[in-house]
Amino acid sequence: MPFTALLGATALRAEPQEVALRLDWDESRCTTAGLLHGGALMALADAAGGWCAFLNLPDGATGTATVTSATNFLRPVTSGHVEAVPRVLHRGRTTIIVDTEVRDAAGKLAARVTQTQAVLR
């Protein structure tokens, strides 16, 4: 996925059962307070969730597109890295719903993102 390269994310796993993307803390991805920017966390989760949905497409589908995305930020990330791991909550004919946990380097939940992906044909 070209955007993940631009974001600086690294794919750790990419299988239908589990996708995992990692993003290292870097000053260029932070707010003025040194917190990993919420937009970076959301972008990482959206990329991971979209990839997971793509790998779980029903027969005859050609791709996915994010329709809705809801993010809950639970703790700031000031160093280390984050990992986004999505799981499919619903795999339908027209939509796939994915829940993505974003955890910090200590394994603590930093954000949770639930998104609906449209199934493209």
Image: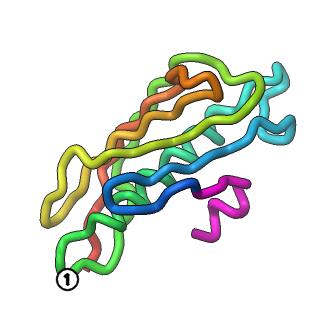
Three-letter amino acid code at disc 1? Answer: Gly
In the depicted view, which residue is nearer to us: 119 or 10?
10
Identify which residue is drawn at 35% across, 74% down.
Answer: 63
Local SS, label 1 = loop
79 is higher (above) or lower (below) than 10: above
Region in magenta: 1-11
Residue located beneath label 1 in the image: 60
Q: How many marks?
A: 1
Query: Quarter of the image holding residue 118?
Result: bottom left
Q: Residue at x 59, y 57 (%)?
A: 11
Q: Residue at x 74, y 30 (%)?
A: 80
Location of residue 76 with respect to 69 vertically, above or below: above
Q: Is 25 located above or below residue 23 in the figure?
A: above
Closest to the observer: 91 or 108? 108
> Residue 4: image x %, image y %?
63, 60
Q: Is residue 25 left or right of residue 72?
A: right
Residue 66 as seen in the image, left or right of residue 109: left
